[in-house]
Amino acid sequence: MSTRRKLVMALGAGAFVAPFGAFAQQQNKVWRIGYIDAGSRQSLVNSGRYAALIDGLREHGYVEGKNFVLEARYADGNANRLRGFAQELVSQKVDLILALGAVETPAAKQATSTIPIVVINTTDPVGNGFATSLARPGGNITGMSSGADETVAKLVELLIVAVPKLKRIAVISNPANIVHGPLLSRIQIAASQTGILVMPLSVRTPEEIERGFITMARENMDAAIVLIDPFLFQQRDQIAALALKHKLPSINPRSQFVDAGGLMSYGADYNDNYRHAAMFVDKIFKGAKPGEIPFEQPTRYYLVINRKTANALGVKISGELLTRADKVIE
């Protein structure tokens, strides 16, 4: 074999050795994924969101305990703990932080400008200061938008159809959630167009939820809108039970509220966001910059109705709503 040919073969072999070595090193790495949630671990597991996240990661080749570990922190309804959790994850040098939504993301954003942050569900990434634009977020944050700012007025419309004599709506929100103010304003605008009175009701604890329903009954509210929030999601069983006790039709963007006994829900599939978050994680771990990965918005929204709850409330669900429903719980 000529000297020249040996040299060419050696150079060719070398060209493959380095990338293969880097690939093998990447394959052998155990990634550390941080996760912060203002709710509870029990809520994450019981709702199926944890399974959806793990399944999504597995579909992209990430197996918990094998090539990634999940460093999860749960505030159990106390949003004041989130900042410390975010700082703790940064000090542990996690490779990426998954932030549930608009309550958790500011804490993560304040803690780091370099570690990638993937937001699982937020209403207005640009308006909340998480991104420069949806198409090109910039910085270290990307993820998914809930589309709630565009669909929240639909909750009013659906209640009007379900409760024809609707005159007064209570809106249950968490003052710790930065997106609830703008969402409440959109509800008030939609309600005012049909002469419906809106009563805002801020709650931070289970006790305040209990007292809030007593207030709604005293003020003769005809229905309630429950805004999406980690704490309120965690308390969905309590909220559904109290709504039934006080004969209040309720609606929320998440179908899990209907599973718990709420009357209706209209919104994107929450669990799909968790499954889809794995795609963002995979892209970033393979070298993509979060600031160059567009925020994604839902492509479909689902109407779910609990007919059993409707019967208990004495609400007659029209054929129009039943036809529009994607799922009816009998």
Image (spheres, rainbow, N blue to C red):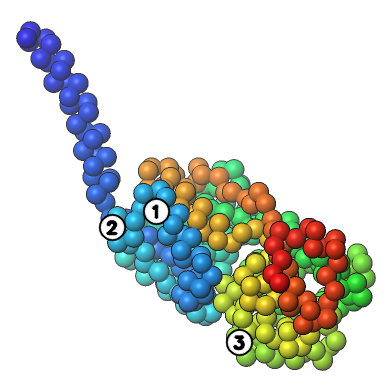
Label 3 vs 2, first from the N-terminus: 2
Q: Which mark is residue 161?
A: none
- The quadrant where residue 189 appears: bottom right
Amino acid type, residue under disc 3 in the picture:
Pro
Amino acid type, residue under disc 2 in the picture:
Lys
Query: Image point 23% across, 35% down: which residue?
Result: 20
Relative placement, left or right, of 98 versus 166 is left
Residue 280 versus residue 222 in the image, above or below: above
Mark 2: which secondary structure? Answer: loop
Q: Residues within 10 Å of mark 2 (few under 14, many from 20)?
A: few
Residue 232 versus residue 186 in the image, above or below: below
Query: Image point 71% across, 66% down: which residue?
Result: 328
Q: Which residue is mark 1?
A: 58
Give percent across and percent down for residue 310.
78, 76
Query: Image point 80% across, 58% down: which residue?
Result: 323
Q: Which mark is residue 66?
A: 2
Query: Image point 12% across, 11% down: which residue?
Result: 5
Q: Residues within 10 Å of mark 3 (few under 14, many from 20)?
A: some
Q: Which mark is residue 206?
A: 3
